[in-house]
Image: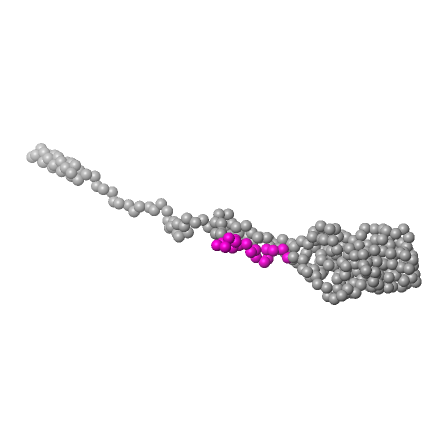
Amino acid sequence: MRSRAWGLLIVVIILAAVILTVILVWGGEPEPAPSTPTPTSTLMPTANAASSTPTMPPTEPPTPAPLVHVVREGDTLSSIAQAYGVTIPEIIEANSLTNPDVLSIGQEIIIPGHFITPTAPPPTGEPPSEPHPSGASPTAAAPPDALPSPLPSLTPSGPPVVEIWQVLGPDRLAVEMVVVRNRGGLANLGKWTLSDAEGNSFVFPSLTLFTDGEVRIHSASGLDTPTDLHWGRTAPAWHSGELIALKDAEGNTIDTYIVP
């Protein structure tokens, strides 16, 4: 009886093994549960990224440069200051002038408070502008602040009123001088003379004397400047009590002065 029971058990195990084998052969391996794909990037495309035109970096405006006046014949610090509407001390400070009475032709003088703005070149990659239908460039006219300020035209405030203002140090060659001042409009002193009854005569070079301007005529030798002229004498020219006459280029007497 016991052997019969073991035999049934073996038969049941064999049948179970056969059924399991059939299931595996016909059904195949079970498919794994589908997994959610992991995105490789969370960056979303934007309109700027899709654009094919590169964005140019902003350009800084050009730095203004100081206005420079080139000294010409007859220029003085007084005339330059008057032309640009600045003061003589401002010009001296801006240019660090050690001797404001000496100016050289061609010397560059910085005008304080006046600047010019250079025209900035177009950014790299900017397409050239289309030609104007008339043949002229549409950008030919530069902005006003990109042009250097020209020297203003000086207009006389009235007729010249030139006079002998002072005679200093007569009879002493080292310090002897005549001060001539203009209290009127512009005056060109070229070929004017200072003379006395003894025949001493100083001839002015080409020199423009502005309103309220003055020039000193030294009897001794020295370096000429727009404000100081030197006669180059070896003896004094003026003596106390004598009369000095200032005459224009045509010989007309403009002023007289008695030496103190």
Name the residue located 75 percent from the left edge and 52 percent from the top edge. Answer: 103
Is residue 86 visible in the rendered structure shown here? no
Foreground pick, 157 / 89: 157
Residue 135 at x, y = what percent? 51, 53
Residue 194 at x, y = what percent? 85, 58
Asked which colour scheme the image uses, the reply is one colour
**Which quarter of the picture shows residue 219?**
bottom right
Residue 131 at x, y = what percent? 49, 52
| Residue occupying the far top of the picture | 3
**Which quarter of the picture shows residue 159?**
bottom right
Q: Which residues are magenta?
A: 132-149
Is residue 130 shown above or below 250?
A: above
Name the residue located 79 percent from the left edge and 58 percent from the top edge. Answer: 189
Quick check: is 210 in the magenta stretch?
A: no
Name the residue located 87 percent from the left edge and 56 percent from the top edge. Answer: 201
State left or right for residue 105 relative to residue 231: left
Foreground pick, 139 / 11: 139
Residue 226 at x, y = what percent? 77, 55
The C terminus is located in which quarter?
bottom right
Foreground pick, 112 / 167: 167
Quick check: is 134 in the magenta stretch?
A: yes
The N terminus is located in which quarter?
top left
